Amino acid sequence: MSDQAYNFAYLDEQTKRMIRRAILKGVAVPGYQVPFASREMPMPYGWGTGGVQVTAACLTPDDTLKVIDQGADDTTNAVSIRKFFQRTAGVAVTEATADATLIQTRHRIPEAALTTGQILVYQVPIPEPLRFLEPRETETRKMHELEEYGLIHVKLYEDIARHGTIATSYAYPVKVEGRYVMDPSPIPKFDNPKLSNSPALQLFGAGREQRIYALPPFTHVVSLDFDDHPFEPSKAPHDCDLCGAGESYLDEVITDDQGGRMFVCSDTDFCRTRCEAGHLGALGVPVLKGGA
Amino acid sequence: MNDALLGGFVDAAVQSSHAFRAALTVLSQPGEIRELHGAVPPAPLSVAAGVLLLTLCDGTTPLHLAGAYDCASVRDWITFHCGAPLVSVEAAVFALGDWVALQPLGQFAIGLPDYPDRAVTLIVEMPALEAKGAVLRGPGIADAAYLSLPEVAAFQANRALFPLGFDCFFTCGAKVAALPRSTHVEAV
Ligand SMILES: [Zn+2]
């Protein structure tokens, strides 16, 4: 049961209407950042207050919610957001990507393919992909209006000149339906291909910066690149040491103070599901079904 | 009791959450049709249009009522349940009417080049609403979708304005569908 001291999903109805209208305009103009009047939430900025407000505006009591932080369901941030919506909206929760109807995420897209009807809500710290090139909002707004995206290409090309490759590995900018350049939030660029043509609806909420934007399902999203330096979604050249997956995004984990380390899937649900299905990595331990 | 006081949501938070999800689904997947329930608005307002108004409109969203929808019973119901200021065409954030009464569309706000979100949302009451007719392609659509639009040319002209333009919900009885400005429309 939800806590009756709060309105359903915490926010009052007028605030939810305002956020819902912003979400709809975001859907109508994919990749464009819609301003909204962000509310104080009972958690600090940096804890995904933009994503939390978008989730609050979208949830119904029938939803099954999953919350991940860098791929993991069990971090303090993910656990507190999940508990917040259990308490205020009474929704069911899950760690299984396939069972979730709404997934709020910080910095990852789940490995398991998303499906029609699912909503993926991203927590966004800095929504403006041009901000590091131009601090003035009036100017970046003008650049989007006029599709003046030359500067961001110059920045990426300077990377190539300096490092021989594009060094940007997180929050790698994309172009949506050939129109708006968009910041996909600090997901690894490994995840960028999953932004495009997803059957799921993707919503982005930035609380401090007061912006909402969206990618409807089956929206064409291209990572910015150059003919002579095509975009490459890189990952560590290893397999997961627990489940043996060769195609998942990996975290490097220090295992002892002797310099021991291992590579494990950043998506904990994906890794656990594979381990339970009998897949075994180099350092994995067989999962005993029904055992302790 | 005055009829205007009746027919609103009984449990606004939960009913509006379901209604919004349906509205979000049809706008993000043009051609999909869903049902909206929970309001009993006065004639000629459809249930779906009434639920959309309760879910999206309030004192901050100027609303234009077109044609037969600009009548005392509808005005009173909206004033009591939404509090949306009723305005002329140019000032409208939302507009409600049948397709003919909403003409000419050129008077509605289509957003500003730096703020394309400041565009009208039309709620178009339809005599029928089916997933067949005009061919839809674009964001939200895997390949092609179909919707019984009132015409084709107006939506092609609207798409040519992108990222400016109006966005539409279509309502018929309890049914709702939508067409964002991003959709490419072709005649069958
Ligand atoms: Zn793994």
Image: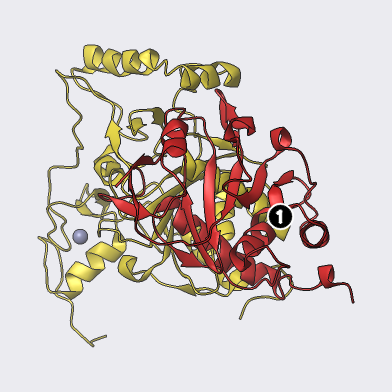
Q: Name the image quarter holding residue A113.
A: bottom left
Q: Position of residue B4 (x, y in %)?
A: 82, 67
- Label 1: which residue? B69
Q: Residue at x 20, y 29 (%)?
A: A231
Q: Residue at x 15, y 51 (%)?
A: A247
Q: Which residue lies most toward the right here?
A: B1
Which color scheme does this rendered protein use? by chain
* Residue B84 vertical position relative to residue B5 in the rendered view, above or below: above
**Palette colour of chain B:** red
Q: Is residue B88 left or right of residue A10?
A: right
Q: Position of residue A180 (x, y in %)?
A: 41, 29
* Residue A258 vertical position relative to residue A83 in the rendered view, above or below: above
* Residue A177 vertical position relative to residue A10 in the rendered view, above or below: above
Q: Quadrant of ligand 1?
A: bottom left
Chain drawn yellow in the picture: A
Q: Residue at x 63, y 34 (%)?
A: B108
